[in-house]
């Protein structure tokens, strides 16, 4: 009996020594494997970023996203480069294609005279103009006080937005091909909206001609003013440029 009791601790000690040997061997193998893996991994910054992105990223590492495709070129801008420039050069005898007048900006403006008595009118007009233009407008204020209109300097009286670049071309495309044909009894635009310096202004009575506006969500029918600014030197160049863009002007009738 004593021999069995004395042999049992020896067996336990042997098992503990064997377990320690195995842990030491596993630790050495793991350390060696990690060292070999680190030695095999690339050291350049680009390869390291690619490795992190392929593994889904680690804590503290920034995962690089794939580059996004650029937005498509506006249709009217492509038409300007391919069709309008050659026609304008031929008709006006420009010595250089860079002399051809171009669109500079489009300004949308809504005057809200009821804002003096209705505090929510500015909010509604701003929301409508944001939906129409796709850009956040600014609130315009009175520059001076007018007692006859009960107007004080600094009172909000309207909202306006200026479009440039691709948004300008996209808005003009929607205006010419979608919004203007929706005007009731539309027979064309008058030519008297030109100011002699290449700018053309259109007065629109109802904002609901734009399909982006939901008739059930507006509080009131409001008009807006659209000003198209170009680099033309005179009205003839400006009117021809807008005609080539598709603006439906009323044709001049020559009496016999």
Image: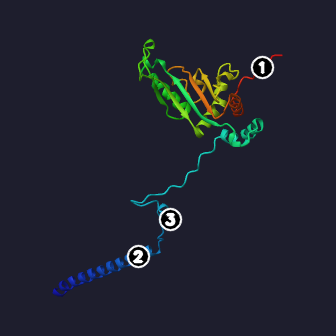
Tags 3 and 2 in contact by the CB under 8 Å rule? no
135 horizontally vs 3: left or right:
right
Give residue 233's quadrant in the image.
top right
The label nearer to you, 3 versus 2, is 3
In the depicted structure, whether residue 35 falls above or below residue 213: below
Give residue 106's quadrant in the image.
top right
Residue 86 lies, in percent from the top left, at: 75, 41
Cα separation between marks 3 and 2: 21 Å
| Image disc number at residue 253 | 1
Residue 129 lies, in percent from the top left, at: 52, 29
In the depicted structure, whether residue 105 falls above or below residue 65: above
In the depicted structure, whether residue 71 falls above or below residue 51: above
Location of the N terminus by quadrant is bottom left
| Image disc number at residue 224 | none
Mark 3 lies on a secondary structure that is helix
The label nearer to you, 1 versus 3, is 1
Taking the view exactly as shown, the residue that stands out farthest to the right is 256
Mark sitting earlier along the chain (3/2): 2
Cα separation between marks 1 and 3: 69 Å
| Image disc number at residue 35 | 2
- Residue ID for mark 3: 46
Label 1, residues with CA under 10 Å away: few <14, some 14-19, many ≥20: few
């Amino acid at each position: 009996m004593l021999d069995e009791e004395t042999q049992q601790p020896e067996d336990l000690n042997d098992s503990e020594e064997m377990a320690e040997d195995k842990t030491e061997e596993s630790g050495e193998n793991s350390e060696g494997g990690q060292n070999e893996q680190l030695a095999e991994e690339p050291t350049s910054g680009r390869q390291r970023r690619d490795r992190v992105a392929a593994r889904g990223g680690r804590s503290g590492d920034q995962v690089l996203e794939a580059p996004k495709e650029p937005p498509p070129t506006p249709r009217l801008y492509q038409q300007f480069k391919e069709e309008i420039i050659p026609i304008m050069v031929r008709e006006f005898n420009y010595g250089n294609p860079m002399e051809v007048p171009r669109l500079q900006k489009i300004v949308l403006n809504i005057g809200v005279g009821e804002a003096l008595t209705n505090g929510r009118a500015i909010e509604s007009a701003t929301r409508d103009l944001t939906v129409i233009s796709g850009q956040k407008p600014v609130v315009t204020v009175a520059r001076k006080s007018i007692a006859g209109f009960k107007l004080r300097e600094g009172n909000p009286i309207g909202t306006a937005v200026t479009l440039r670049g691709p948004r300008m071309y996209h808005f003009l495309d929607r205006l010419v091909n979608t919004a203007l044909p929706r005007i009731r009894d539309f027979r064309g635009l008058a030519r008297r909206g030109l100011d002699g310096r290449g700018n053309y202004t259109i007065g629109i009575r109802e904002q609901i001609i734009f399909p982006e506006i939901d008739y059930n969500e507006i509080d009131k029918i409001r008009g807006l003013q659209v000003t198209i600014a170009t680099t033309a030197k005179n009205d003839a160049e400006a009117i021809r440029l807008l005609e080539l863009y598709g603006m439906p002007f009323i044709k001049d009738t020559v009496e016999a």
